[in-house]
Amino acid sequence: MLLGTTCLHGELPTTNTVMAARARLIALRSPELQRQLGVDPGQIERMAKVLDEVDLPLWQLRDLPPDQGNAKALPLFRRLCESLDSALLPDQLKQLDQIAFRLQGWQALQLPSVVDQLRLDGRQEQQYSEFLAGAKALAGRSPREVSLAEFNWIQQVLTAGQRNQLKELLGAPIDFSRHRLLQVKAPEVVGVDHWINSAPLKLEDLRGKVVVVTFWTFGCINCIHNLPHYRKWHAQLPRDRVTLLAYHTPETAAEHDLERVKEAVQKQNLRFPIAVDERKENWKAWGNNIWPSVYLVDKQGYVRAWWYGELNWQGATGEQQMRARIRELMAEPQPAGEAVDRK
C-alpha cells in the first residue's frame, strides 16, 4: 500500500512528493470517487479542514523540480497523511492509493515506493529515465496517445511478474472522463490596482460561470500567438456563461509601463477583462511559471484544466482541446454540496 505504509510508518517519499499528494487530493475532491470509496459525510467532514489547508500550497509547488519542491511539500504531505489515516478505513486507504496511482499514470513509476515494490533493476531505471526524456515530446498530445506510449513502455520493459504487480497497485480500471476531477479551489484575485476593459472582478462573484484565466505579457511572442484564440473565445462563447480574465504579468522593465500595456491591449483589440498584475501577486498565488498559460475554472470555482505555452505550438491541438473542455464545463450541472469543500 503506497500511502498508509509509506507515509506514516516508514520513510517519507523524497521524489515527486507533490505529485503523490495531489493525486490523493484530487480523488478525495471528486464526488463520484467519494462514492466509489464509500466515504460517509462524517469522514468527509473530518478531512475537509486539512484538505483545505494543504490543497493550494501543494498545488503551488506542482511545477518545481523535486530538489526545490519536496522540502516544502513534505510537512504538508505528512499533515495530509495523518488526516487520512485517522479518517479512512484500511480498505478505503488501499483503494484511494490505487485511484491515485491511476490518476498519476506512468509518472507514478518515479515514486521510490513503487520502484521498490516493482523491483526495477538498473537497466529498467535507465530505460525509464530515457522514456521520461522522450515523453516531453508528448506534451499537448491527446490522452489516448499518451496512454498508448505508456502501455507500450510497460509491455516492452517490465517483466510479466512486474506487470502483474503493477495491476495489483492499480486496482480496477477507472474511466476518469466520467468523473469531475477538481484540482484546487482557484486563488482569488489579489493585489490588482488597475483593470482594463472592466471594473474590478472577484472570482467569487463569477460562481455559476466558467472562467478562463490567462497569464500573458505584451512583449512575449508566444503570448501574442495565443491572443487570436482568446479573442475568438470572447467573441463566440456566451458571456452569460463564460468569462475571460487575463492577468497581464510583466516580465521586462518596459512591460511594467501601464500606458504601454493599455496601448498593446488596444492594438491587439482585446475586449475581455484584463487585470494588471504589476507585483506578480496573482502569478505567485497560482504558482505560475510560464508565459503564456491558460487555466479553466468551473462553475464552483475549481481549477479543472490548464495549458502552458502556445496553444497550437508545433502541431499541438491546445486550442481545440481547451475549447472542447470549456464547452464540457459549460454543460455541467451546478452540483449543490457534493464536493469536500465546505467554504
Image: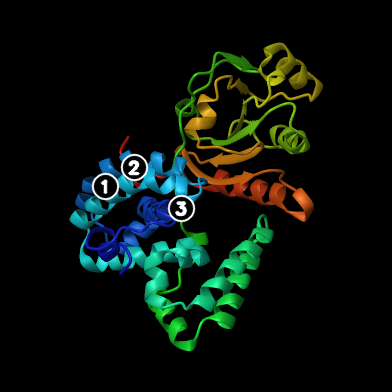
Q: Secondary structure at mark 2?
A: helix
Name the residue tied to disc 1.
79
First in residue order: circle 1 vs circle 2: 2
> In the figure, is residue 174 to the left or right of 144?
left
**Dot 3: element:** loop
Q: Is residue 183 visible?
A: no
Q: Tell me, for residue 181, which label it has, or none.
A: 3
Q: Earlier in the sequence, mark 3 or mark 2?
A: 2
In terms of depth relative to the viewer, which is nearer, 56 or 195? 56
Mark 1–mark 2 Cα distance, whole angstroms, equals 8 Å
Q: Amino acid at mark 2?
A: Val
Q: Is residue 134 visible?
A: yes
Q: Amino acid type of disc 1?
A: Arg
User: Which residue does the image show at 53% across and 18% down from the upper left?
Assistant: 192
Crowd band around label 2 with a 10 angstrom C-alpha radius: few (<14), some (14–19), many (20+) = some
Q: Residue at x 62, y 28 (%)?
A: 246
Q: Is residue 99 shown above or below 121?
A: above
CA gap, disc 3 and disc 1: 22 Å
